[in-house]
Amino acid sequence: MSVYLRAALGLLPLGARPGVLPDTTLTRTDMAVDREHLARYDRVCGFRLGDALPATYPHVLAFDLAMELMTDRAFPFPVIGLLHATNRIEVLRPLTADDRLDLTVRAVDLRDHPRGRQFDIEATVTVDGEPAWRSRSVYLRREKPGPPSGADGPGLPAPSSRWRLDPSIGPAYASVSGDHNPIHTSWLGARAFGFPSPIAHGMWTLARSLAALEGRLPATGVIEATFRRPVPLSTTVAFATDRHTFAVTDPRTGKPYLLGAVTPPR
């Protein structure tokens, strides 16, 4: 059964769901990096081709485990309708296609939010028993309207470039990430969920931003991103950056789609 068929079945009223996150850790050990897949990922996100793993690449390796966890009936919410609010990545050591990766994924910290409830999906990569990469993705289960999430990012630097987002980005990124959510790949699917056109994957937008900074990022450190608004495909966005922060914005209004920051290791 495909992961999105399981996700769709999760919308059916098949009994009460638990009120807590499952105490489950999913693992995959001794993973080899598929260089062809890595090259496809690099191309669709704008990275240079090579053996170095972009900081966002382990996220796609963890995606199927995260979906396995969130589409299980033991999970408190249906995965369809969850909003990916923020992402925090720690690169503890550079990773390459030569590394053999051990990967773990778990859900933690279910908590209240003014608009509903939030939880985190934690993913960790270790190499030879040593942590090399960690990610914390915050998801929101929206259950009620709430106050705005804050200012739109005053003091953003002036845009340095503009990107025209072709609709093919949605299916291309879905192919390499495994995230075939129809809001990213189908006009009908997007409209069914209230979007006038398909929207970019949040993690593609983050990866494309890091690709624009390639050669200027520290080899290790922390990358944080807040996904403020859906990014419509078939549109033009502006990219802005200064020493430690970056943003993807609407060039007409200046409102941010994504706000990010890079913290070098201390």
Image: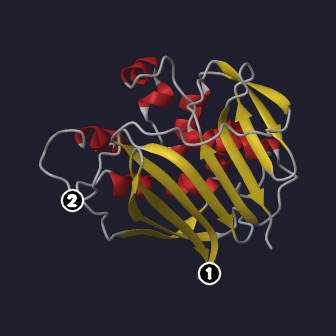
The answer to whether mark 2 and mark 1 are in CB contact below 8 A is no
Q: Amino acid at mark 2?
A: Pro
Residue 46 in sight from this viewpoint: no
Q: Residue furthest left?
A: 15
Secondary structure found at label 2: loop
> Mark 1 belongs to which amino acid?
Asp
Instruction: Find disc 1 in the rendering and name its residue.
Output: 128
Query: Could you classify mark 1 by the number of other residues whose Cα lies within 10 Å: few (under 14), some (14-19), or many (20 or more)?
Result: few
Q: Earlier in the sequence, mark 2 or mark 1?
A: 2
- Residue 40: numbered disc: none
Q: In this figure, which residue is indicated by the disc labeled 2?
A: 18
Q: Quadrant of residue 89?
A: bottom right
Q: Does any portion of residue 118 appear in the rendered image?
A: yes
In space, the residues marked 2 and 1 are separated at their CA atoms by 36 Å
Q: Position of residue 264 (x, y in %)?
A: 80, 65
Q: Position of residue 98 (x, y in %)?
A: 70, 67
Residue 204 screen position, x and y as percent: 62, 40
Question: In the displayed image of the protein, which residue is found farthest to the bottom?
Answer: 129
Look at 69% across and 40% down and name the residue there: 45
